[in-house]
Every structure is written in structure tokens, then in C-alpha cells.
Image: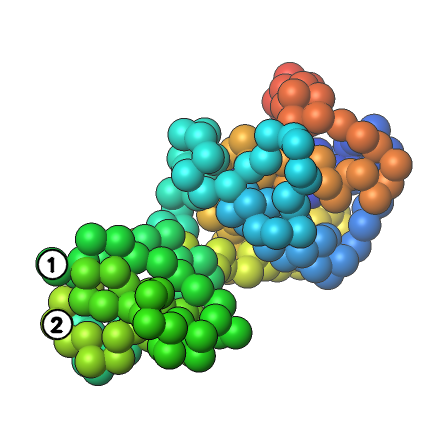
Amino acid sequence: MNNFDLYKMLNFAVNKDIYAKAISPPEFQLELQAGNMRHFRKRLGLPETYIPGQANEGAGVNRLTDTDLLPFLVEGIKPCVNGLVMLNPSPYYVADYYTSTSITSETIGIDEVGNRRNNYITKPTAQYLAAYIVLGGLKILPENTTGNVNVSYYRKPADPTFVTSTDPVTLELIYSNTSVELEWDDGSKLDILSVILQKFGLNLSRQDVMQLGAKLIERGK
């Protein structure tokens, strides 16, 4: 399922006609990009999606969420020099890191660094590491940490693009293979489309959107 399939499904859901442009291609690209990041942050379980007292999504919460996030998971052994670990691609969310001597590791906010450095009880050591995100990587405390670090983190999804042209004879929309596809599996792509459809007043579930796709296939579109 590519971006063009999603575009046709949107038009069919809104106008019952895959050729009617309920939304222009440039607008659809913007909606795809916004939905892409919104879905990513929701799957990670970032603070704005947290609802006290309710079951919430998030990395490590359940296998389904972890499976959805697999395209963006980066794992590897990285060199650390004076506490600095450079990561490429850059991390969006650090899941875990450890060294051959560490027992536990914690990712902290920049506002906690000073306190942790100077706190006699919680000061990071080679066995009990702490780290914070810096541009392009991870800064590990204590700052004299050197050697190899095992890191697991999630990178930012690639921005999808929706490149089209118009057939000069039939005036039909032609989808370009230079477009950048969503990196999610089909189920998550349908979730993103569902969010876009909500802006048209259509509150359709993933299952509802799947049924729309089935109808298009039956029509040979």
C-alpha cells in the first residue's frame, strides 16, 4: 500500500469517487507528514499522549507497539569518548544503553544534570550511568566514560512525499515513483489515514478504512 493508494481511499471515503480531489496533492503531502509524526509520537507514548488511569501506548508497553516501531529502531555498539556518544542517524528517543561495567542506566533531562553531578547519593558512576540527549548523540555521566557503549534508540521517520503530475490527454493524476513512502506497515498507514479523514468529519476506524480499500480492489482501481 503506497501513498497513492491512501489518496484514492481518502477521495473515495469523502466523495465516493477516487478521481474527485477532496484535497489537493500538496495538501495531502502536508497531512501525511503531520500524521506520520503524530502517529510516531503516539506509538512512542510521549507525554502529551499520556492519560492517567487509562491504558496507554508506548515503546516497551506491548509487543504490537514495539512491532509497529521496528522500522525506526536502531541498535549498535558505538564508541564513547569522554562521555560523548555520536549517533547516526540522530536519536529521537533513546530506549536503552549500557557498557560492559554498568549495572543500570538512566536517561535524564538537561535540567537534572547539575543536580546529579553534585549529588553525593545519586551521582552517576561507571556502574550506575546517567545520560542526556545532545545534538547528534548522547552525553553519558560520569563524563570520563570511554570505550564502547551498546545503544538502542528510535530515529525520526523519513518525511513522506506525494509527487504527482497530470496526464495531458486524459487529465488523470499520475503518481511518481520519486515519492517517498510512509515507512509504517499497512495497519499503521490506515491509522494515519483515519486521522486525516477525521478532519473531514469522518470518524472511521482502521477496520472501516480497510473495508474501503477492499471496495476499491473489487472495482479494480
* Front residue (pair 115, 103): 115
Q: What is the x, y in percent for residue 100?
A: 11, 58
Q: Tell me whether circle 1 and circle 2 mark residues in contact (CB < 8 Å).
A: yes
Name the residue that disc number 1 marks: 100
State the separation of the CA atoms marked 1 and 2: 9 Å
For marks 1 and 2 on the same chain, the one whose residue lies earlier in the sequence: 1
Identity, as a three-letter code, of the amino acid under mark 1: Ser
Mark 2 burial class by Cα count in 10 Å: few <14, some 14-19, many 20+: some
Q: Secondary structure at mark 1?
A: loop
Is residue 219 visible in the rendered structure shown here?
Answer: no
| Residue ID at (30%, 57%) | 105
Q: What is the x, y in percent for residue 97?
A: 27, 57
Name the residue that disc number 2 marks: 147
Which circle marks residue 41 in the picture?
Answer: none
Residue at the outermost front position: 120
| Residue ID at (84%, 32%) | 202
**Does residue 100 sit above or below 9 in this rendering?**
below
* Front residue (pair 55, 86): 55
| Residue ID at (20%, 53%) | 103
Snapshot quadrant of residue 78: bottom left
| Residue ID at (32%, 53%) | 96
